[in-house]
Image (cartoon, grey):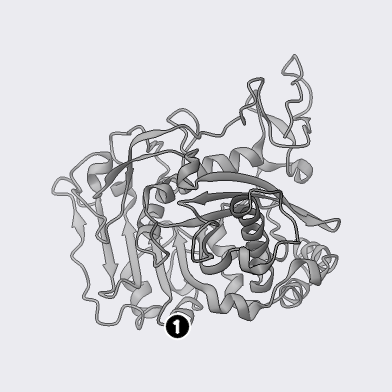
Amino acid sequence: MSSTPLPSRDVGPPVVDDPGGFWIDASNNIVGLFNDKISGFPALVDQQLLGNPDGDDWERFKPSTFDIDPNKSDAGTALYLVEYGDDSLRMVVAAWAINRAASRPDKNTDIRFLFGPRTDIPDYSPPDLYPYKRKRRQGIIVQPYAELAFTCLSSPRLGAGLPKAIASQGMASSKSHIVIMPLCMFDFWGPILCRGGLLRLIREITTYISDRTQNTLPPTSSFPDDVRQRVNRVAVSGFSAGATDSIKLFRYANASDLTASYEKEKRDREAQSFAARLRSCKTQFWESPAADLDKTWAEFYSVDGYYGSNTYQAFPSELAPWFASDSERILRIYATPGRMSAATDVIKNKLPDVFKGVDPPKPVTSSKDPNVTAEEWHRSDGRASLVWFSQAYLAFPKASLWVKNDGYVHHLVPRIVFSHAISQSRMVNM
């Protein structure tokens, strides 16, 4: 981290400087990170989440409120910002240990892995902005990749962007787990889009936090396995384009498979670039056995994922067979019309066995406006849910402290539903 001073005048090219680490202010606080105590934090912890469609704001759901403290060390909650990789590729990863994760007496650690939204957009350009460079955006100096991590994970109040509070929602649950969010390099995820690559990153993060938490010493390779935490249960989640990217995990076991998939796109310059970058990665440093992830990857959350269109034909066919292959697996899907035109079409054509025996629910619809409607499908054994919200259902007229309504409801979905997914998880309660 660095407190490199800023230029005195807001002039010059968009890219300002590279502090070489996360931006900290004169008081040694990380700029943009909200980690204060929160009282009355709304979260959805029951299976049924829809409330009064005629209500405002959180009244349209069934929230409980919680007091959370992101810095409560005696509860085992702490944020880690780390670099991962070698000379061939360097990634920055945010990881938040929640509810004594990485220090459980049973030596097991549960993981919630997040593929965030796309970064190949002007906010994150030019590509060499990654990972720490600061730039001007509408006259304001920002550190875009840090901003992405903190907006997704922490809970800034209104006026500080669209908070998704994904880690904060985990704190509101009783589940012990580590939230891992790698920062995507201008749309390049490296080897973690294959199962072996993903597991290696998960194991490295778990070991790093375990060494610091369990042994109260700097991380080292000398600690024996019997004092370290083991990866127990993995939930993979994808929001927006991150859900699209995460589907590659179902298809590719290792980096060679992933590389070959890019190489086949002969006319796609970006794909060829990705293949070349992957070829430079040393397998022994970037992969674990993919079969090991197959044993521990037990949950998948699609959070308003965009799969090419909003028709059922575009919805990924990989989810149903993955779900059916193990009775411990859990599937959660949350969508709005721009990503899924009709829940019934997806269930009928892509997920019939997943929701077999589940009667179509009665839509929850406003008595004042039929466009304000939503529906939720749940298996009786709790293993699968599909919740669909109309645009109007989320465009409520009143904005609260924790949900900002700017008319684009896509970015409200993760703030609302991650607490539901994690609370219904089979991760360990602490």
Q: Position of residue 422 (x, y in %)?
A: 40, 58
Q: Is residue 323 above or below residue 58?
A: below
* Residue kind at label 1, given as amino acid type: Asp
Q: Residue at x 13, y 49 (%)?
A: 367
Question: Is 303 displayed left or right of 243 in the figure?
Answer: left
- Percent position of residue 151, x then y: 53, 40
Which of 31/29 is in front? Answer: 29
Left or right position of 89 against 207: right
- Which sits in the foreground, 324 or 271? 324
Q: Mark 1: which secondary structure?
A: loop
Which residue is at the far left?
A: 367
Q: Is residue 69 above or below residue 111?
A: above
All told, the count of numbered labels is: 1
| Residue 392 drawn above or below residue 28 | below
Q: Quadrant of the N terminus?
A: top right
Residue 193 in view here? no
Residue 101 screen position, x and y as percent: 51, 56
Q: Residues within 10 Å of mark 1 (few under 14, many from 20)?
A: few
Which residue appears at 28% of the width and 34% of the height? Answer: 398
Quadrant, the C terminus = bottom left
Residue bearing the label numbered 1: 326
Q: Give the quadrant of residue 188.
A: bottom right
Please name the residue shown 28% across and 68% down the image: 377
Residue at 62% across / 53% down in the picture? 209
List x then y, in percent, for residue 218. 71, 49
Residue 109 visible from this viewpoint = yes
